[in-house]
Structure formats: structure tokens, C-alpha cells
Image (spheres, rainbow, N blue to C red):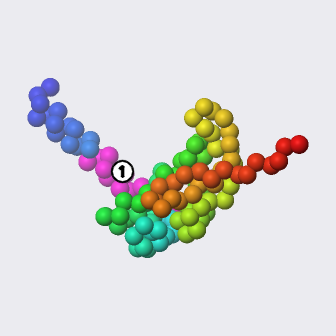
Amino acid sequence: MPSDKFAQGINSYVGTICEELLSLSSEQKSYPVYRCPKCGQQSVGIYAKVAKCRHETCGFHVFREVCGILLSEDNIRDLISSGRTPILKGLTSKAGKKFNARLVLKDDYTTTFEFEQNKKRK
């Protein structure tokens, strides 16, 4: 097959695929926008895999999947507004062990865990 015919076929195929994709209705859930704890702009959007500031120079982001669980919209809202989530149950460590902890926003706008106080053993 001549290269120009091949290229023409590819272009036609790409055009067809693009039309099909553009004609699909957007059924994605729309999330509210939150105030960024780093830059103060009302610009933190929640996406499938990350919550991030839309302001170009800010760079604030939080991955939604943490230790095997997906942070809910409420978890993201709590983390951004109060600096911590409620206790997240069923997190999985790198060693495969389950644990419960809060996700806490540090001063450098990264996250860390805050573990529950162990109950006194008798």
C-alpha cells in the first residue's frame, strides 16, 4: 500500500473517532470548586485521580487514591478546609497490612498520616 494512501486512511479514521468522541454526552459528575489552601484562590477542582489547584503557578495537588482507598469528595473538602480528614479505615501499607489513620495537610502542603491513639492494653 502506498504511504500516501495509508496516511489518508489514518487521517480518515482519526476524524471518525474524534467525531464519535465529541458526540458522546458528558456523564461525568461535576464537583464544586474549593478554595486552595496554598494560594487562596477559589480554584481547587476534583478530578478522577487528583484534586488540584487550577491556578497555573500554584502547583497544589492531592492524589485521590491513598493506600488503596479512593478519597471521597467529603474527604477532599475536609482536608482542604480543615487540614485533616476524618479517620480513614482500611488503608493498606506497603507491607500489605491494614491500618486506620487521618490524612493531614502539612505546612508545605503535602500530606502525612496521623494515627489513632492506641487504646491502653490490659
Task: Relative to 12, say whether 64 is above or below.
Answer: below
Q: Main secondary structure of the magenta part?
A: helix
Say whether residue 64 is left or right of residue 120: left
Residue 111: percent from the left, percent from the top?
Answer: 51, 54
Residue at left 32%, top 52%? Answer: 19
| Residue pictured at 14% horizontal, 25% vertical | 1
Instruction: Say which residue appears at 11% left-offset and 28% top-offset.
Output: 2
| Residue 27 shown in magenta | yes
Q: Return the x and y of residue 93 as percentages of the image width and height.
A: 61, 38
> Mark 1 falls on what kind of element?
helix
Please tell me in which quadrant of the rendered image residue 87 appears.
Answer: bottom right
The quadrant holding residue 122 is top right
Q: Is residue 11 visible?
A: yes
Disc 1 marks a residue whose amino acid type is Glu
Q: Which residue is mark 1?
A: 20
What segment carries the magenta color?
A: 15-29
Please check the rendered image and state whether residue 113 is part of the magenta-colored stretch, yes or no. Answer: no
Q: Give left or right: position of 29 versus 18.
A: right
Residue at point 16%, 37% (across, down): 7
Q: Which residue occupies the foreground of this view, 101 or 88?
A: 101
Q: Residue furthest right?
A: 122
Badge 1 density bin: few <14, some 14–19, many ≥20, Cα 10 Å: few
Q: Residue furthest top?
A: 1
Using the rendered view, name the quadrant where residue 39 is placed.
bottom left
The count of marks equals: 1
Left or right side of 6 for 34: right
| Residue 28 appears in the rendering | no
